[in-house]
Amino acid sequence: MCDFSSLGLADWLVKQCKQMGINKPTPVQEHCMPPILEGRDCMGCAKTGSGKTAAFVLPVVQKLSEDPYGIFCLVLTPTRELAYQIAEQFRVFGKPLGLKDCIVVGGMDMVSQALELSKQPHVVVATPGRLADHIRSSNTFSMSRIQFLIMDEADRLLEQGCTDFTKDLETILAILPAKRQTLLFSATLTDTLHDLKSIAMNRPFFWESKSDTRTVEELDQRYILTPEKVKDAYLVHLIQKFTDEHDDWSIIIFVNTCKDCQILTMMMREFNFPTISLHSMMKQKQRFANLAMFKASVFKLLIATDVASRGLDIPTVQVVINHNTPGLPKIYIHRVGRTARAGRNGVSITLVTQYDIHLVQSIEAENKTKLKEYPVVEKDVLKILTQVNVTRRQCEIKLESTDFDEKKETNKRKQLILEGKDPDLEAKRKAELEKIRSQKKKFKQNIHETIEKQKRGQLKKKIMKRKQKKKAGQTSV
Ligand SMILES: Nc1ncnc2c1ncn2[C@@H]1O[C@H](COP(=O)(O)OP(=O)(O)OP(=O)(O)O)[C@@H](O)[C@H]1O
Ligand SMILES: [Mg+2]
């Protein structure tokens, strides 16, 4: 049987693992740790909750113990909360070494981060945007000697989604030494494999867990088909049922937008569910505080946008509900992967409207899984329908009276300024574009109307001619 020692891990680290209740390596650890310890680049693709973090943290801590200096390792990750979680793992495993870490993420004080960076910590865990800002604005630290570059959730870092990290990554990669080990991990690496290979060039070792499905077996995947207007009633019904039946369960509800997140949180509180939210329009300190309270089970219900969909490891989460059907199978994999982790069981329920059926079909096809219907007594849902919809409307009105939309606008302006654009100029450009678009639309409409008019005219003429012919025929008879 494979154990950590036989993989080349030092005794003190094996002991450290044992103290954390980690006795036997998971497959991704078994396969990826030896090549990393050998000095090779590594790309590891394994399911959610399968222990990828320890698969890269343990070898790095071991290598660091052999030749300790700062800055030894840089970890990049797409979200701030995940950066804290990874740094904590380094801190725990590296405790006997006195490992010093530094977390560099947006939304936190930049000056104190710069100070920390200048103290040459062993490990820097960062989100790309803020680290790139530091590189552009100061020269108080050097990463020219780092031995390890790790990208956790590597596919997210390299894809061009709503947050595009490309420019920041270019800035970061430019100051890193070419001679280094690059480690890339995610549950969904395969789509971006081509881009990843250009980053990990040192004889990369690629390991992917072989499995029929892309989600874990312990996860019971369900769906509920519901009209859009009844969706919230189903949600309230489900939460009521779970909270009635289980004391120790935590539930995450994923939603599409920050506004939806805010409204649903207000709504759930109206129904007296202990609810907390997490989305990108909240102040960072509040985000950390909310997540900490959810982890500590002070609040049993977390309503979040996709900012919480990747990497977060919260053992108490038994249920994940998708309030909207994810547009991409990949997003679905990460969201539902917040439960059924490390061999535990879990349930995911996706609320599907008539417009989302094709999305479910592509999720099923790509992930090679079939979602089963979740049985609900419809009569019970209809009983609360009016009350739920009235409550939603009340919450919407309440939110409209706050400056939520204004804040969104301010955030957008801030983002544009950070991207080096003039918000007023952009707004003008947008308005002009809109004007051109509406002119085009009008023009098209006019043409369409003229054609229709012509057609109608021709038709009228034809009918008239036919009538005249008929008349002429009748008189000649
Ligand atoms: N060898 C092991 N034995 C038992 N538990 C483990 C082992 N390795 C890691 N774990 C635990 O498994 C849980 C999930 O690990 P981790 O967060 O690293 O998963 P992951 O593969 O990174 O998932 P995701 O794709 O969602 O980020 C953690 O709580 C971790 O402590
Ligand atoms: Mg992870």
Image (cartoon, rainbow, N blue to C red):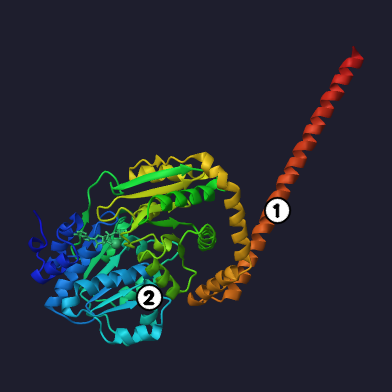
Nearer the observer, disc 1 or disc 2? 2
Q: Position of residue 472 (x, y in %)?
A: 89, 19
Residue 443, numbered label:
1
Q: What kind of element bears circle 1?
A: helix
Residue 325 visible in rendering: no
| Residue shown at the point (36%, 56%) measured from the top left | 249
For image coordinates 36% across by 75% down, the residue present is: 171
In this picture, is 38 found above or below 232?
below
Specify whether 215 is left or right of 272: left
Q: Gap between marks 1 and 2, in whole Å?
A: 49 Å
Residue type at numbered disc 1:
Phe
Locate residue 387, reporting x and y percent. 59, 51
Sort mark 2 into few (<14), some (14-19) or many (20+) by Cα contacts within 10 Å.
many
Residue picked out by circle 2: 105
Q: Does the residue labelled 2 lie within 8 Å of ligand 2?
A: no
Residue type (three-letter) at the residue carrying disc 2: Val
Quadrant housing residue 66: bottom left
- Point out the quarter of the image occupied by ligand 1: bottom left
